[in-house]
Image (cartoon, rainbow, N blue to C red):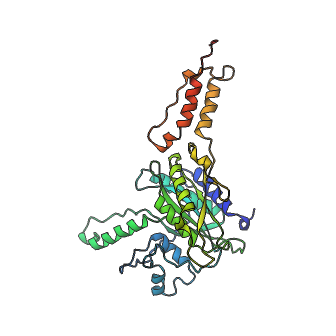
Amino acid sequence: MKYGELSLAGVVFILLVGMRYAPNGSTQESLPMVPDKTPVVTDNQIPTPAVWKALCKLNPDFGLNPDADKARQTIPQGAKDPDCIDDLPQDLIVSAIATVPDPVTTNLGLLTDRTIEAIQTSAAEAGYIPYLEALPWPIQKTTSMDSEKDQPNLSKKQSADQDNDVDGQYPGVLIFRTSESLESRRKYLTVFMVSETPTAGVDKEQTYAALRIIGKIPHRSGNAVRKVLLAGPFFSGSVASLEEIARKFRDSAEWETNSSDNNISSVRCLNAYSGTITNPGIEVRKMLDPICGPLLTEGQTRDGEALKLFTDWATDKKNGLGYRPTQIAFLSEEGTQYGKGTEETSKQQDRRASCPPDSTT
């Protein structure tokens, strides 16, 4: 298949596979991302989130006038986002969302690095090279102990803390540009990164912001139902938060576009693809919309199916271990979303165990 014929689903599939089988060590150096150093507008304005500092640079007029650039990145009073991409050509950008383990509130920083590296590698396989980046997590900076002049003053520290607070409300983004000049493919690939933890699930605020931003990106479909592909979640306990997000933005009037511009349309459908979860729960099976399709597509065998296969083998007298069902016990978590998902499986195992024991054993 030629790069120019690669579909959005193919791009997300490559992202998913790359994230699922991310290597422990890189065998090839990743291309450096261009750092974002655009100054923040602080004159009684909401600090510009890092994700918008990067996205605004996709405006073809960016860089011609510093004052105009600052104005483009400024969030209008009462708004949540700048309007710097509203006039971009249609179908210039293809977008997707990826859940990334939160390196700040968890000890999963190594997995975060490997995930980002996998996204970069997957994008390269699809013919895109790194261009811009914006991370939603604060960067730890070391300070010199030699002299006090190296220490940041209080006002600068407060400004940095304020920026970090704002960035935490928005997703991160990795922006790639095509390595080939083909009219049949879109010039930019934007992968919006939202934080995820095993206990709290997918960050709802960042996901809502990512869907809102994608809805502002001009595309040729006009006001038709817009679908967004998501690579994730990583953890089975995150499925509940994913369901809540899907229901809210699909049913809420908040996602109705009020713009008369046909280039801007609301996002209604979310299709997630996970290669790691094994216990999504029962409710996810009901999340099937006639227009949107399934909310979640899994790439791993579910725990219930795996436990049944194990039980069948363990109780098989001829080809297995020959145990009675009452001799088999399963340990599972309690009080977590992952543990709740095993409730149906546990009940099924209890019913099997309650059967009269084999008299010939």
Q: Which of 81 and 282 is in front in this view?
A: 282
Q: Nearer the viewer, residue 146 or 201?
A: 201
Q: Is residue 9 above or below residue 213?
A: above
Residue at the left extreme of this rendering? 148
Q: In this view, does 192 lie above or below 298?
A: below
Instruction: Report x, y in % for residue 101.
Output: 48, 54
Instruction: Report x, y in % for residue 6.
Output: 71, 64
The residue positioned 26% from the left and 72% from the top of the image is 149
Dividing the picture into quarters, in which one does residue 213 lie? bottom right
The residue positioned 58% from the left and 81% from the top of the image is 87
Residue at the top extreme of this rendering? 360
The number of callouts visible is 0
Instruction: Report the side of 254 relative to 77 (left or right).
Output: right
Where's the N terminus, which quadrant?
bottom right
Where's the C terminus, which quadrant?
top right
In this orientation, does residue 7 appear? yes
Instruction: Report x, y in % for residue 69.
Output: 48, 83
Dividing the picture into quarters, in which one does residue 308 lie? top right
Instruction: Report x, y in % for residue 105.
Output: 40, 54
Q: Is residue 47 above or below residue 174?
A: below
In this orientation, does residue 21 appear? no
